Amino acid sequence: MSTTTTNDFFKSKVLGHPAGLFVLFFTEMWERFSFYGMRVLLINFLTFSILGDNPGWGWSAENAAALYGTYAMLLYITPIFGGILADRYIGYRWAVVIGSIIMTLGHASMAIETPLFLYIGLGLLVIGTGFFKPNMTSILSEMYKGHSDKKDGAYTIFYMGVNAGAFFGMMLCGYLAENVGWSWGFGLAGVFMLLGTLQFWLAKPLFGTVGEVPSKADRIAAEEAAKTSLNAEDKRNPFTLVDKILIVVTTVIGLLYAFNDPLSKIGNINLFPFKAGSVDGQNVMVLIALILFLVLVITRIARYTTVVRDRMIAVVVFAFFTVFFWMSFEQGASSLVIFARDNVDRTLEGGSLMTFNIVNTILTIVPLLIVSWVLILLAKQTWNRIPGSNIVLAVCFIGVWGVVVWMLYQYFTADKSEITVSWFSILNSFFIITFASSISKIWDSKYNPSAAVKYGLGLIVMAIGFGLLAFGAYGVTEGIKVSMIWLVLAYLFHTLGELCLSPVGLSYVSKLVPARMIAFMFGMWYLAIAIGNKLAAILGGQIENITKEYSLSTFFLIFTIVPTIAGLIVMSLNPILKKLMHGVK
């Protein structure tokens, strides 16, 4: 892309940034709307009673979590392949469109509410995310070539789109699903995914050549530039045949395990029908894959010079502790949904209902007004060039406003209301929007702690949230429900922990890893997050069993103690990690 083309983007500005950024903002917003709108429903739908006016499927928490865990795990693996395909063959824009269409079909399948279409829908969502997720940020990065000074602000705006979509998706899809019918919630997610795709496609004139299919000459030039940028250390350490074999073997075993977990629990189909003593076959294979992967990582790292090797060891240490964080944090998609539904007093009336209605109205209307204002600014700047895209966006917002007004009317006209289970999930997005800038300012000040301390703080602060849940649930017996304040406080501390830890990881991978290993180490990083998500679902699925055998408080204590210990350990490793990082801050 030429400099002239890049500068053209900055001739049409919205809030000091090119209008194209806000097309991406809304595209990502509707994708996150659909993704989180479905995500907040899945466990609740699968485990909801088969009796009543709005029946679910009555699955056990363990079976539902096995399916969700595999889905969540695969979401962090397919983007690796989607990014490669876009880079080399189809371009970022086509990848986004293809991914969006596949995800729309996935949401439509899930709205049918049969087992076959549920599995097809989840599969399509995984594939579609693989195309969509890595390439939106690639388009954004390409747009800002030559304008690196504006890139941080652009990513901040883009990140707000992510959280706005998650916020409204969980609120509105959740409300429709729980009060009208599950297929309405799943269907609404699909409708906005489709409209988001359409507005992105109709905005093509705004992007010029950004994100187009790479020509053969461009690919060759990029490869030559990459070779030129490699230092001598990187050039003499290519992947060997053994490396490639280990990558394939561990990938195959990992994928087989991911599918076997729900297959064996739900369908009684076991891909590893053997035992080693008392250890199930799938767990034996996972241990083998883990050992082989460690061999791969260790042998790769050992071939580098001391400084590069030490820095990569630091990345591996951070990746290890990342697993513990997401293993606990992602309880928000499984056990905390079940806890909110079955153990939290969500019924309000009188003054408490009026207070909730006022708070809920402010929470909903204020961000929707802000995002609608951005839409108006975008339309003013781009109406002549992309009228179709603006019309589609206007239709989206009319629809959202319609559902919001209807939802608030239902709450205000009721003498007694039960807060939806999904409402609590929006708190994470709300707290991120509220506290992100403050945390960012701390990191930019003289009080900016080291990476190890940030990691430790993230784990410990999140653990405090679970500690509050353990305290609130202490002594609770069957039929007794706890105050919702405990869950609200838990989400507050979980979000503060996320803001301490989550933004740090990828930043340090890019700073510490040499160019030749960057793709491999990013893949390893996402693998750590994928493992954390799968472990979160496995452990979250045990909420019913642990509560029955011990207590609900005991269940939450697990996620209080384990992350606290992990946080203290990583903070104690601070001097060692500083030495391994060799001056990288």
Image (tube, rainbow, N blue to C red):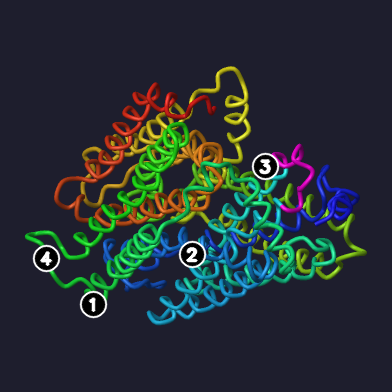
Q: What type is the residue that disc 3 sits on?
A: Thr
Q: Using the image, determine if residue 176 lies above or below residue 427.
A: below
- Per the image, label 1 sits on a secondary structure element best described as loop
Pointer 2 with pointer 3, Cβ within 8 A: no
Q: Quadrant of the C terminus?
A: top right
Chain-order first, disc 2 or disc 3: 2
Q: What type is the residue that disc 1 sits on?
A: Ile
Magenta stretch holds residue 356: no
Q: For mark 2, does the 10 Å Cα neighbourhood hold few (<14), some (14 to 19), or many (20 or more) residues?
A: some
Query: What residue is shown with label 1?
Result: 269
Query: What residue is shown with label 3?
Result: 156
- Per the image, label 2 sits on a secondary structure element best described as helix
Query: What residue is shown with label 2?
Result: 78
Chain-order first, disc 2 or disc 4: 2
Q: Is residue 79 left or right of residue 459?
A: right
Q: CA distance from mark 2 to mark 3?
A: 25 Å
Q: Using the image, determine if residue 368 lies above or below residue 447.
A: below
Query: What's drawn in magenta, residue-wise?
Result: 142-153
The circle on residue 275 is 4
Residue 393: horizontal and vertical position, in percent? 76, 64
Residue 130: horizontal and vertical position, in percent? 53, 65
